Image: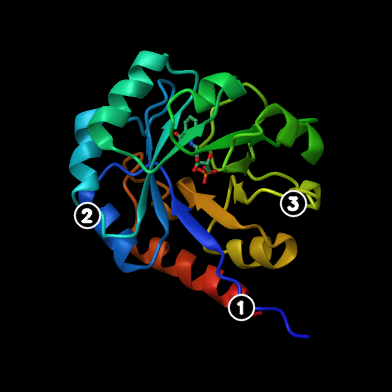
Amino acid sequence: MSQPPFRTRIKFCGMTRPGDVRLAGELGVDAVGFVFAARSRRRVDAAQAAAMVEALAPMVDAVALFMDNPAEEVREVIARVRPALLQFHGDEDEAFCRSFGLRYLKAVPMGGEASLDPLQLHARWPSAAGFLLDGHAPGEAGGGGVAFDWSKAPRGLIKPWFMAGGLTPDNVHDAVASTRPWGVDVASGIEAPDGVPGAKDGARMRRFVEEVRRADCG
Ligand SMILES: O=C(O)c1ccccc1NCC(=O)[C@H](O)[C@H](O)COP(=O)(O)O
């Protein structure tokens, strides 16, 4: 029996300009991410993110991304930005992640010597809506354009998982075709190499989406 058609979800992360958010919606992207991590060159404040949400097409999720931010700051962002989903990149435990009453993704570092035990992930964050497997090493910030060894991608993850780290319009077709993630997440790969941090490049955004869809048809 043939497989039902599958549409790989796409999240564009580290948005800093309303025009990029608008284009993401027009391209059919599923979610956009706003980074509130202190260590990020793409960091925005709640007022900037709230303004970008105004440019968001209906049915496109806003995701608020944190890395060991104080709970008070997370609560303030939720109140002002109204994200559909949270994403945690630091040492946040299960109790912290679920304490805000919103669905969340837990990011998992895949760089360095890290190896992934799907059962352990589920046991540590049973309330996670899904996981985001990122290319950076443990303790490092994401968003650096670093890919992980795709052969380490899990086979036994029951919850939806995103592939992240070092994806570009040139490699995302192969990434999707070889690992079949539930979704892909990209920041650097849709920015101009010499551009302002966070500012996305329209042609790269478009080509990234086209390449994911080409993999979905394969
Ligand atoms: O993007 C950041 O600046 C960032 C900073 C601190 C923690 C996480 C961060 N980004 C997380 C993401 O979801 C990125 O999209 C993901 O790491 C992929 O980034 P890239 O390799 O640049 O595509």
Q: Give the farthest residue toward the bottom.
A: 1
* Image quadrant where residue 131 sits: top right
Along the line of sight, the residue nearer the viewer: 51 or 158:
158
| Snapshot quadrant of residue 15 | top left
Alpha-carbon span between mark 3 and mark 2:
32 Å
The residue closer to the viewer here, 161 or 98, is: 98
SS assignment at label 1:
loop
The circle on residue 5 is 1
Residue holding disc 3:
150
Residue drawn where x is 79% and y is 46% of the image:
152
Residue 19 circle label? 2
Earlier sequence position, callout 1 versus callout 3? 1
Q: How many marks?
A: 3
User: To which quarter of the image does residue 190 belong?
Assistant: bottom left
Left or right of 187, for residue 165: right
Q: Residues within 10 Å of mark 2 (few under 14, many from 20)?
A: some
Q: Nearer the viewer, mark 1 or mark 3?
A: 1
